[in-house]
Image: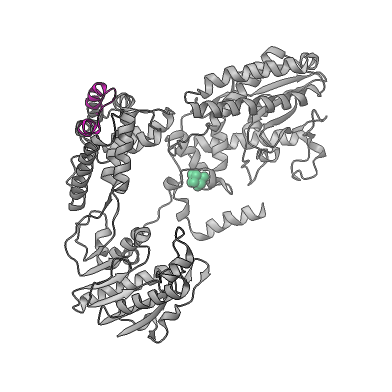
C-alpha cells in the first residue's frame, strides 16, 4: 500500500516519520527505512528527533547510555569528530601562533591528560585566559599558563610535549612526522582517560590509520617542516569520510542516492514536494548540451530528468509492502506544493497515520516538575561603612539594577569576557583619556591652544597618540598592528576635533585632569577621578567627562524612575565640586559625533552645553540649577544607603539587561510575566 501525507513543515515531517517508524517496529517490522534528502546536512536535527522518539530517557543527565534502535547511514569528514578535532588542535598549538580561542578549547577538551580530574581548575584557567589578551599561543605558553592556574597535570603534559617539540625542529619526511605527531599526542595524554564508547574507539582507529597514511606520502612530497606536515595531515583528515559501524538496527535513516536496491518491511520517503521531485535538469557544464541530449544522458533535459525521477520513485514504491510518501507544505516562509508525481496515490491526513504516541522528553519533564517554593530574599547582609570597592560605579549599578550592584561589586560576579581580534573598548577608552590628559598637561590653558599653529598641534596629538597606543594597545601581531594604526588615526582625528571646539571657547585654564580625589557620602569614602575640570575666566568650573559612545546624553543624569538616574556619575562629581560649579558636560568622542553635551548654571559655556533653566523638557519639580543639585544630593545619599543596607532587588531599569551578562544568576526571565511586561511597556513609553 502506498500513502501520500502532507506535513505542515520540514520539522513535523521528520517527527511524523520517526513516530511512524517506531509504530512499525512495535508492530513487528524488522527492517524500516526512512529516506531523507540532504541527510548529511540535516543529520544533527534528524538524530535529535529520532532519539527523542526512540530513546527519550537517554537525554536525561546521568542516564545510562541506551542503544538506539536506528542508524543514520551517513558519513562525514573525519575531521568533524570531536576526538580528531582535539588531536588537530593539539598539533595546531604545537605549530605556535595559535589564537586564544584555540587555547581555550584545549583547556576545555576532555581528550587531554587529566581533563576530568582538573575540570574545575581548567574551566577557571579558561575564564582567566580571556583577561590575559595574549594572542599567540603555543605549548610553551600553555605550560606556563597551566602552571600559573594550578593545572598541574596539564602543565606536566605540556612540558613533555615541549621536550619533544624542541627535538623536532627542521624538515623531515611525512613518515617521520607521522611518528612525531603520534609521540606528541601520546605525551599530551591524548585521547584522555575517559572510557571510550564504540564510536570513539573506531574514530581513534581511523585517525591512527590516517596518520599512517600521512607516512605513506614519502614518495610524493618532499621533506616538510612542522607547519607543512600539520597542513598535510589536516587535508588528509578533512578528505577522509568516516561512518562508524553500528550494530544492525531495525530502522535505517538513509539518503535517496544510497537506498537503491534495498528492500524494507516498511518505507517512508520524505521531502517529495514539487521543487525536489522531479529535480531541475542539471546538464553537465563541460559537455556540449546537444551531445548530451543526443546520447540521452539522464539529467540533460527536463523530460529526461522527469523520466528518471519517475523511475526512481517507482523503484522506491516497490521496495516495501508499506510505503509512505510525504511532502512538507512549507519551508521557512515559502509555501510548497506536492510533487505531480504523487498524483494517483491515495492521500491520508497526518492524524490518520499509525504513529507511536510518544511525547517529547521536555514535555514530560515539564509536566512532572515539582512545585516551586518561591521565597523572596532581596537583601544582602548590610555592609560596614568604609571604602568599598567600586567607586562611582556603586551608584551607577545600584541605580540601574540593585541586584547587579550587589552581585558584581560585592560577590565579584562577572560574565566571561569576550575574546576576539578587535581592540578592547576599555583599552580604547584609556588611550583617549591618556592622550587628552597628556595634551592638556602641555597646553595648560585655552590661550596656549588658541596660539598654537594647527600643524604643531596635530604633531603634538599624533605623537602622544602613537606613544600611548604602543603602551596600551600592544600591537604584538601584524593583524593587531593594523588595527592599532586605524585606532591612532581615529583617535588623533577625534581629539583634534574636540580641541577645535575648545579653541573656539571663551578663555579657560585646565585646573585638574585625571586627578584622584576623595568624597565621603553616608559613611562611604569614594575615590573619584574626574577626567577634567576647567576653571573658566568668567568664574566657576566646568566638569568634563570623556565618553566614547554616541549614546551618552545629559538627560541620563535625571531620574528614569524615582530616585534612579541611569548615569549618576556626573551628579556625583557635581556633588564633590558643588561650590562654584558653572556646568558639567560629556565630551563625546565617537566616530559619528565629537561634541559637548551638558548643562550650565547660567551661561552657555560651549556649543552643546545648554543653560539648564532654558531647557524646554526639564522636570516640573526641578525648575532650576540649585534644585537639580539638591535633588542629586538626595538621590545619591539614598543610593549609598541602599547599597550599604544590601538592597538587592532584581529590578533593572528598562533595557538594562541588554548590556548585562548576569541574567543566568539573577534569573530575571523567571519573573512573573506581568513584571516583565511592565519593563517592556516602560521602554515603549520612553
Ligand atoms: S540581567 Fe538585568 S536584572 Fe539581572 S542583574 Fe543584570 S541588569 Fe539586573
Please provide percent x and percent y for residue 364: 31, 67
Left or right: 5 with respect to 253? right
Which residue range is magenta in the image?
Answer: 158-180
Q: Who is closer to the viewer here, 351 or 185?
A: 185
**Residue occupying image coordinates x 42% and y 35%:** 411
Please provide percent x and percent y for residue 250: 20, 70
**Residue occupying image coordinates x 43% and y 67%:** 292
Q: Quadrant of residue 618?
A: top right
Left or right: 327 with respect to 17? right
- Whether 175 is among the magenta residues is yes
For the question of whether residue 635 can be seen, the reply is yes
Q: Who is closer to the viewer here, 405 or 272?
A: 272
Q: Who is closer to the viewer here, 129 or 50?
A: 50
**Residue occupying image coordinates x 25% and y 33%:** 174
Please provide percent x and percent y for residue 64: 19, 57
Number of numbered discs on residues: 0
In the image, residue 623 sits, relative to residue 267, either above or below, namely: above
Q: Is most of the magenta stretch helix, strand or loop?
A: helix
For the question of whether residue 523 can be seen, the reply is no
Q: Who is closer to the viewer here, 293 or 195?
A: 293
Please provide percent x and percent y for residue 34: 30, 71
- Whether 249 is among the magenta residues is no
Picture colour scheme: one colour
Q: Quadrant of residue 392?
A: top right
Q: Quadrant of residue 427?
A: top right
Location of the N terminus by quadrant is bottom left
Amino acid at each position: 500500500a502506498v500513502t501520500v501525507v502532507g506535513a505542515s513543515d520540514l520539522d513535523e515531517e521528520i517527527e511524523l516519520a520517526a513516530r511512524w517508524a517506531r509504530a512499525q517496529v512495535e508492530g513487528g517490522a524488522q527492517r524500516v527505512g526512512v529516506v531523507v534528502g540532504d541527510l548529511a546536512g540535516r543529520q544533527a536535527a534528524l538524530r535529535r528527533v529520532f532519539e527523542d522518539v526512540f530513546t527519550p530517557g537517554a537525554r536525561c543527565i546521568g542516564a545510562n547510555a541506551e542503544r538506539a534502535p536506528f542508524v543514520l547511514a551517513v558519513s562525514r569528514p573525519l575531521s568533524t569528530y570531536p576526538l580528531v578535532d582535539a588531536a588537530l588542535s593539539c598539533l595546531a598549538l604545537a605549530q605556535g601562533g595559535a589564537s586564544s580561542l584555540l587555547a581555550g578549547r584545549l583547556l576545555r577538551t576532555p581528550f587531554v591528560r587529566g581533563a576530568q580530574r582538573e575540570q574545575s581548575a581548567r574551566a577557571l584557567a579558561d575564564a582567566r585566559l580571556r583577561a590575559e589578551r595574549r594572542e599567540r599561543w603555543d605549548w610553551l605558553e600553555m605550560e606556563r599558563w597551566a602552571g600559573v592556574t594550578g593545572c598541574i597535570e596539564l602543565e606536566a603534559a605540556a612540558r613533555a610535549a615541549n621536550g619533544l617539540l624542541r627535538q623536532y625542529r627542521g624538515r623531515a619526511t611525512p613518515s617521520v612526522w607521522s611518528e612525531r605527531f603520534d609521540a606528541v599526542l601520546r605525551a599530551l595524554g591524548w585521547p584522555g582517560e575517559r572510557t571510550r564508547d564504540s564510536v570513539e574507539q573506531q574514530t581513534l582507529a581511523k585517525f591512527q590509520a590516517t596518520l599512517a597514511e600521512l607516512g605513506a606520502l614519502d614518495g610524493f612530497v618532499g621533506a616538510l617542516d612542522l607547519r607543512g606536515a600539520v597542513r598535510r595531515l589536516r587535508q588528509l583528515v578533512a578528505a577522509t569520510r568516516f561512518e562508524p559501524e553500528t550494530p544492525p538496527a531495525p530502522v535505517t535513516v538513509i539518503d535517496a542516492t544510497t537506498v537503491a536496491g534495498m528492500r524494507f518491511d516498511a518505507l517512508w520517503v520524505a521531502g517529495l514536494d514539487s521543487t525536489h521531485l522531479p529535480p531541475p535538469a542539471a546538464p553537465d557544464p563541460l559537455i556540449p548540451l546537444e551531445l548530451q541530449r543526443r546520447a540521452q544522458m539522464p539529467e540533460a533535459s527536463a523530460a529526461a530528468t522527469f523520466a528518471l525521477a519517475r523511475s526512481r520513485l517507482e523503484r522506491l514504491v516497490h521496495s516495501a509492502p508499506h510505503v509512505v510518501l510525504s511532502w512538507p507544505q512549507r519551508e521557512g516562509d515559502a509555501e510548497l506544493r506536492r510533487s505531480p508525481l504523487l498524483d494517483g496515490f491515495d492521500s491520508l491526513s497526518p492524524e490518520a497515520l499509525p504513529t507511536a504516541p510518544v511525547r517529547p522528553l521536555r514535555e514530560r519533564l515539564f509536566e512532572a516538575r515539582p512545585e516551586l517554593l518561591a521565597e523572596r530574599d532581596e537583601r544582602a547582609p548590610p555592609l560596614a561603612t568604609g571604602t568599598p570597592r567600586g567607586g562611582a560605579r556603586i551608584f551607577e549599578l545600584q541605580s540601574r539594577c540593585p541586584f547587579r550592584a550587589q552581585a558584581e561589586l560585592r560577590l565579584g560576579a562577572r560574565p566571561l569576557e569576550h575574546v576576539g581580534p578587535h581592540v578592547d573598548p576599555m583599552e580604547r577608552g584609556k588611550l583617549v583619556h591618556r592622550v587628552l590628559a597628556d595634551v592638556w598637561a602641555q597646553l595648560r590653558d585655552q590661550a596656549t591652544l588658541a596660539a598654537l599653529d594647527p600643524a604643531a598641534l596635530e604633531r603634538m596629538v599624533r605623537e602622544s597618540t602613537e606613544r600611548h597606543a604602543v603602551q596600551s594597545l600592544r600591537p604584538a601581531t601584524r593583524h593587531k598592528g593594523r588595527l592599532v594604526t586605524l585606532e591612532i588615526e581615529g583617535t588623533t582625528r577625534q581629539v583634534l576635533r574636540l580641541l577645535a571646539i575648545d579653541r573656539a571657547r571663551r578663555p579657560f585654564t585646565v585646573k585638574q585632569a585625571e586627578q584622584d580625589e576623595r568624597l565621603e557620602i553616608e559613611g562611604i569614602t569614594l575615590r573619584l577621578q574626574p577626567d577634567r575640570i576647567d576653571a573658566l575666566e568668567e568664574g566657576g568650573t566646568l566638569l568634563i567627562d570623556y565618553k566614547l559612545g554616541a549614546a551618552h546624553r545629559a538627560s541620563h543624569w535625571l531620574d528614569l524612575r524615582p530616585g534612579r538616574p541611569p548615569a549618576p556619575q556626573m551628579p556625583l562629581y557635581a556633588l564633590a565640586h558643588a561650590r562654584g560649579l558653572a556646568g558639567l558636560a560629556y565630551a563625546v568622542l565617537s566616530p559619528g559625533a565629537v561634541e559637548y553635551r551638558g548643562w550650565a548654571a547660567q551661561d552657555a559655556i560651549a556649543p552643546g552645553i545648554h543653560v539648564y533653566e532654558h531647557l524646554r523638557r526639564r522636570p516640573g519639580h526641578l525648575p532650576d540649577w540649585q534644585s537639580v543639585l539638591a535633588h542629586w544630593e538626595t538621590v545619591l545619599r539614598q543610593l549609598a544607603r541602599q547599597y550599604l543596607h544590601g538592597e538587592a532587588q532584581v529590578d533593572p531599569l528598562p533595557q538594562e539587561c541588554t548590556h548585562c551578562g548576569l541574567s543566568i544568576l539573577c534569573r530575571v526571565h523567571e519573573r512573573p510575566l506581568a513584571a516583565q511586561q511592565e519593563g517592556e511597556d516602560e521602554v515603549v513609553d520612553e
